[in-house]
Amino acid sequence: MKKIACVLALGAAFATGNVLAWGNDGHRAVGAIADQLLKGSVAQAELNKLLLPGESLEKIANWPDCVKGTYCGPQTPEMLAYVAANPKHSEYHYTDIPFQNAHYHDHDVGSADDDIVQTLKQAILVLQGKDDPATNPHQFTKRQALILITHLVGDIHQPLHVGAAFVAKDGHFVVPATQAQVDEVAIFDARGGNNLLLDDAKITALSDATIPAPLPAEEGAAKPASTYPKSPTKPLHSYWDTTVVDYAMRRLSTRTPEQFARKVIASQPQVSVNTGDPVTWPYQWADESLAASKIAYTDVVAGPATQQTSRKGDVYNVWALTVPDNYPVPSSALAKQQLIEGGYHLASLLQAIWP
């Protein structure tokens, strides 16, 4: 199969850590699906007690990303208080389990006490009214718990927010047996796919050949052009955060998250069903996302490592990727299913908490 070779420049914004899973539209789509599924339910009445006037799950879905900076606008006093009380809040959004693994287990390589599975457990216990100082070390309020759940249920269904790539210097994906083996000498952490680079022009050309063109923007809805210089590469993580969401919406001929939600609900999709105490559901979601991450990495090949220097002067390794020439098609199909799963699972969780 023909592959695309990918070149080697990474924007400084992606030099470390994970960024915004699903992006603005993806998170809003998850929230919008849940909003529509919960209409008229006891759960909707209960969650409305925690929302401010005019808020919905769709509208709060990006709140935990917005607190990371000012790109959503000025920080509110509520946001500033949350950040001050949660200095590790950026770590709540992901875990880094080798994508080759089948299951998430506490204390395995890539897991952490403040990762997405543990944070979701804590927030669920808060909404269940079962929390105590030991199970709610961050002292989340019920409103904060609802906001976090709305966002993190979306995050945990983004495959690269669970399934992580660890790379040998020659570019082979490997499975470290211990965290100590990830020494940045023999085995490297690819930072949730942020250090794995696609050639942006080539992946765009492939999508132009396989993905429908976007619908014209509605009057007054056009997004302002970015003022940042365009990088010739796109981190794989960024591709899965935003690009595949755009492709999924284009394939459904939808412009907005609300339109996407209505269309997928009308299709009566098949969705996995979670069982047992809802506090265990984050483990089930993580395992499902690990399975999805294997699809995301199918036939993805990394070349030898090269080094780049961030604006702060930090030197780090990056790897150029080759992907199948039809990659936009299966990746956008998987993104669509994961967004649907996220929305339905969010609604099911809230209904289980407030039956």
Image (tube, rainbow, N blue to C red):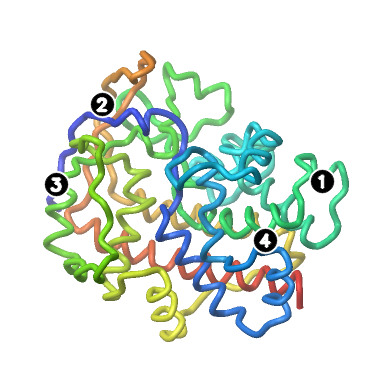
- Write down the residue under mark 1: 135
Q: Position of residue 240 (x, y in %)?
A: 36, 51
Along the viewing direction, whichever of 256 and 51 lies nearer the viewer: 51
Residue displayed at 41% across by 32% down: 190
Lower position in the chain sequence, tag 3 or tag 2: 3
Residues under labels 4 and 3: Cα distance? 38 Å
Lower position in the chain sequence, tag 4 or tag 2: 4
Q: Type of residue at label 1? A: Thr
Q: Quadrant of the C terminus?
A: bottom right
Q: Type of residue at label 2? A: Pro
Residue 8 in which image quadrant: top left
Lower position in the chain sequence, tag 1 or tag 3: 1
Q: Type of residue at label 4? A: Trp
Residue displayed at 67% across by 52% down: 120
Regarding mark 4 in the picture, which secondary structure is present there? helix
Lower position in the chain sequence, tag 4 or tag 1: 1
Residue 146 in which image quadrant: bottom right
The residue mark sitting in front, 4 or 2, is 4
Residue displayed at 77% across by 60% down: 127
- Write down the residue under mark 2: 304
Lower position in the chain sequence, tag 2 or tag 1: 1
Task: State if disc 2 and disc 3 touch (CB < 8 Å).
Answer: no
Question: Quick check: 76 above or below 246?
Answer: above
Residue 281 - label: 4
